[in-house]
Image (cartoon, rainbow, N blue to C red):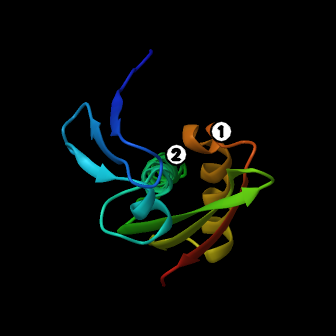
Amino acid sequence: MKITKKGSAEWSGGIKDGKGLVSTESGSLKNQPYGFNTRFEGKPGTNPEELLGAAHAGCFTMALSKILGENNLTADKLETTAQVTLEKVGEGFEINAIHLSLKGRVPNTTQEKFQELANMAKVGCPVSKLFKGAKISMEAMLDQ
């Protein structure tokens, strides 16, 4: 099985005064503004790092749901935040760290088992594999 999805971007102008738009094939993002100010100055709009964070959080959480099912467990709720770090290195920038924060409500398991299964998802999800050059850390808290 092979699945291909598309995202797109447009850009006009220079790096600091320019403006861009990002869209997804599904239309869930359509002409969402982004630019230097949304990436580095906290202005409204999106940026590549938060889009990568949302993708990683979504992929990781789905992978964990699958792994839980393989262990005869079902989550009442899983909430994941992926914090993506963009850092100046030399003359440029690089994404060099991602921290996953997971809170889960999973009946009939222990914190230790939850942590073990979450680590399997962290290593195994396709987006984690894509970021293999970055340091991916995680904390997983099971609500009892």
Q: Quadrant of residue 137?
A: bottom right
What residue is rendered at 51% in x and 50% in y?
A: 56
Question: In the shown orientation, is residue 111 left or right of residue 32?
Answer: right
Kind of residue at disc 1: Lys
Q: Secondary structure at mark 2?
A: helix
Q: Residue furthest bottom?
A: 144
Q: Secondary structure at mark 1?
A: helix
Q: Quadrant of residue 75?
A: bottom left
Q: Is residue 100 above or below residue 91?
A: below
What residue is rendered at 47% in x and 66% in y?
A: 80
- Residue topped by disc 1: 129
Earlier-in-chain disc, 1 versus 2: 2
What residue is rendered at 48% in x and 84% in y?
A: 144
- Mark 1: give few (<14), some (14-19) or many (20+) Cα within 10 Å: few
Whether residue 91 is visible, yes or no, is yes
Instruction: Out of 103 and 93, give the one closest to the viewer.
Output: 93
